[in-house]
Amino acid sequence: MSRYRYSVYGIGVASDAPLALPAYTADRLADVECVTAAAAGPLADLTQAGPPHPRSWYRHASLPDGSTYVRWDGIGEFVVAADGQRITHRQLNASSFESFQVYMLGQALSFALVKQSFEPLHATAVVVGGQAIAFLGDNAFGKSSLAACFLEAGHQMLTDDLLILRPAADGVIAYPGPPRIKLFRAVARRFLGEAAHRGGMNAETDKLIVPIDGDRRCSHPVRLAAIYTLAAPRDACRRTDVSIEPLSAREVFFELIKGTFNRRLISRQRLERQFSFVGALTERVPVRKLLYPRALDRLPEVRSMLVADLQRLTFLD
């Protein structure tokens, strides 16, 4: 039976093993149970799932009962129930507990969230003046680096990489994620000093898992004031200036669709839900394009422009 209870992304998490998460709260959007699999034996029957890609360390398979199997070599494997209410997991020997948790509470949990009709965004969010701003973009677009620059200036971390939103009477509410941020070593040293870390992400990257404790993290839901979509690195590297540009409603719609977290689960029902979710978000939250050169010494300038833009948006609101 699950002995430990936590909350993350507004979701109640029951676990049979301790996790590095905030304590459980009664005000939650849904529930997920995390259960440790037996030490031996296959986690799922993959005979009908097809062979894994020969050059990929990641495997994903839809199983006949509607559940989903996902595995990251050297990290862990997971089976997410068809209704999204249970994740059965097994940590692999080569991974650290911190790395395993990152994948379970990020990628694996995203399958459970989508199965429970949530639409997570691939975004990192910080809190400025009591309101959240989110940075939307794919892997290696600079979301976490930009958030670290905000932490250096005394702002709070809300979530890194996965964002859950809920419409409310006065706008949209953003929910806090796990109290950590994933950063390349040089970025962590530049903005967080010699911050202690609990280990690397995986053997394929130099990223560290940096805990965010105390006053540097926001542990409660806050109103989302704006979303900034980040330009791809190949486009940003040709720039010398920093700019925040408006987007048309059509452009906002496509940026938000592209910014969906978990593109593996595809169905007509989900596509309809995505269109409805993105359409409502487009009407409720300002979305702008952020373009800047990818250089660490320019990030304080980017931060200042974002804070000034947020102040203008707040004044207009």
Image (spheres, rainbow, N blue to C red):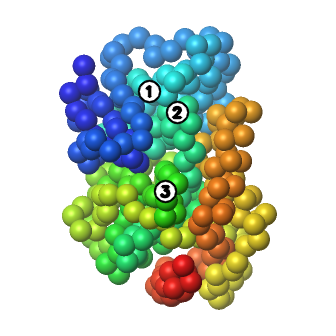
Marks 2 and 1: in contact by CB < 8 Å?
yes
User: Which label lies toward us, 3 or 1?
Assistant: 3
Report x, y in % for residue 178. Answer: 35, 51
Q: Residue at x 62, y 58 (%)?
A: 281
Instruction: Find residue 25 and report its image quarter.
Output: top left
Q: Quadrant of the N terminus?
A: top left
Q: Residue at x 25, y 35 (%)?
A: 5
Q: Is residue 251 visible?
A: yes
Separation of disc 3 and disc 2 at Cα? 19 Å
Amino acid at dot 2: Gln
Q: Quadrant of the C terminus?
A: bottom right
Q: Is residue 184 visible?
A: no
Per the rendering, the mark at residue 85 is 1
The correct choice, above or below, for 251 with respect to 203 in the image is below
Separation of disc 1 and disc 2 at Cα? 8 Å
| Viewer-closest of 286 and 142 | 286
Q: How many marks?
A: 3
